[in-house]
């Protein structure tokens, strides 16, 4: 019998490694939702709800040989996994891929697809009815959201507020920030940077209401809806014992250069839950590919184990389907809007995931 692999969490990293190892090992994928949410395209679905039909991928179409358990890990201690249903698993290899929480309507925690769809429709209605929108957070998610809103609803007033002095914190070229600011300005997005808010609005995010905030500079901002575009929190509350101890100060699981959780022999972590790299879907996918190759070596006894190498900075920030800019390794200078639109902005990478959820093809 093939060795068993349990993957906890079916996000970008988890579904990919489960799919890649399907057939090589006896794979079990565990996720409390019925469908993978391609949250990279959540903002597009927020402004154009017909996209809701393109961003949920049912797990029952993923694996041909392995099984999908719609369940939640409530305790994981070493390789011992206890699920909410009471089922216990103790596989030969355990992959933790529970990712991170992020405010809705971008992500929906472990809600099922019907709940997430209904929530995104309600958020769309709140946005549609708003003349003024406040986006708190000028990272890639906040900028993309502002770009989507202004492209679809050019008459709405959109303000992006952040305590950071510039847009897009992180290891990126200043030229990229300048290009994004230039395009945002052209779209009519207003920036209120370099001053922390005295407090968050007392209205729920993504909900219609009288939003009013003031920053430390004394600027008052009023809106009819606001979106919280900061606050990635790794999902690790179910870890026990040495695994819980393996978290760093920020809550990420520390892994070695084979993505093995420190101090564990056959427990691995990929994606946003791990401290391997920045929180990105693309990197979760790279880590899934890397670990699938290494686990295949361990399972078959053939080939050599690789060491995971940190990737250089890379990002594509669409501002609507045709706008935006990016930075790619090996690309000379800033990646222009046409290229960002080709690789991401127009189709939002939906086909890439669609082709993985093809088990029904037999
Ligand atoms: C608006 C927005 C836009 C983004 N755009 C980009 C982009 O363009 N490019 C990019 O690279 N990154 C982007 N990101 C970042 C990207 O979404 C994350 O890095 C990515 O989701 C991480 O994938 P993951 O596989 O680690 O986990 P996640 O996608 O967070 O998935 C985790 C899965 O684990 C499940 N789970 C959680 N707890 C449990 C449990 N106890 N038991 C079982 N299952 C559990 C959840 O239900 C979920 O399905 C964006 C993020 C946002 C919010």
Image: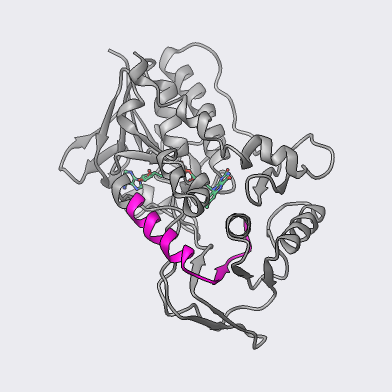
The location of residue 121, given as percent across then percent down, is 38, 55
Quarter in which the C terminus is drawn? top left
Task: Locate residue 91, reporting x and y percent.
Answer: 29, 29
Residue found farthest to the front: 155
Q: Can residue 359 be seen in this view?
A: yes
Residue 246 rendering spot, x and y as whole percentages:
43, 50
* Quadrant of image for the N terminus: top left
- The answer to which of 188 and 313 lies nearer the viewer is 188
Asked if residue 127 lies in the magenta stretch, the reply is yes
Where does the image place residue 40, in percent across and percent down from the top left?
52, 45
Q: What stretch is highlighted in magenta?
A: 116-142
**Quadrant of res 77:** top left
Compared across the picture, whether 42 is left or right of 121 comes to: right
Quarter of the image holding residue 8? top left
Q: In this view, does 286 lie above or below 281?
A: above
Residue at 50%, 62% (x, y): give it. Answer: 231
Q: How many labels does the image show?
A: 0
Judging depth in this view, the residue of 266 and 104 nearest the camera is 104
Q: In this view, does 2 lie to the left or right of 216?
A: left
Left or right relative to 233: residue 61: left
Left or right for 168, reference 67: right
């Amino acid at each position: 019998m093939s060795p068993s692999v349990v993957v906890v969490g079916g996000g970008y990293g988890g579904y990919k490694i489960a799919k890649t190892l399907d057939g090589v090992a006896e794979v079990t994928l565990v996720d409390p939702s019925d469908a993978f949410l391609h949250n990279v395209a959540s903002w597009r679905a927020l402004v154009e709800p017909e996209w809701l039909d393109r961003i949920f991928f049912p797990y029952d179409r993923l694996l041909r040989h392995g099984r999908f358990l719609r369940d939640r890990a409530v305790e994981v201690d070493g390789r011992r996994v206890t699920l909410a249903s009471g089922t216990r698993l103790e596989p030969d290899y355990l992959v933790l891929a529970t990712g991170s929480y992020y405010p809705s309507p971008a992500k929906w925690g472990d809600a099922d697809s019907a709940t997430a769809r209904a929530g995104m429709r309600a958020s769309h209605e709140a946005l549609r009815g708003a003349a003024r929108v406040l986006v708190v957070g000028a990272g890639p998610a906040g900028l993309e959201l502002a770009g989507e809103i202004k492209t679809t609803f050019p008459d709405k007033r959109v303000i992006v507020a952040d305590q950071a002095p510039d847009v897009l914190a992180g290891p990126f070229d200043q030229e990229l920030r300048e290009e994004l600011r230039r395009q945002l300005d052209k779209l009519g997005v207003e920036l209120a940077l370099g001053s922390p808010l005295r407090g968050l609005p007392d209205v729920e995010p993504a909900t219609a209401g009288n939003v009013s905030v003031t920053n430390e500079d004394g600027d008052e901002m009023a809106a009819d809806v606001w979106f919280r575009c900061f606050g990635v929190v790794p999902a690790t509350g179910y870890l026990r014992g040495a695994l819980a101890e393996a978290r760093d100060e920020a809550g990420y699981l520390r892994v070695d250069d084979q993505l093995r959780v420190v101090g564990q022999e056959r427990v691995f972590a990929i994606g946003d839950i791990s401290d391997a790299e920045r929180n990105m879907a693309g990197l979760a996918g790279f880590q899934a590919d890397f670990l699938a190759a290494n686990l295949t070596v361990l399972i078959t006894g053939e080939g050599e184990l690789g060491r995971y190498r940190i990737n250089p900075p890379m990002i594509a920030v669409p501002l609507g389907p045709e706008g935006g800019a990016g930075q790619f390794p090996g690309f000379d200078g800033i990646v222009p809007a046409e290229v960002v639109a080709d690789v991401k902005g127009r189709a939002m990478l939906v086909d890439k995931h669609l082709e993985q959820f093809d088990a029904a093809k037999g």
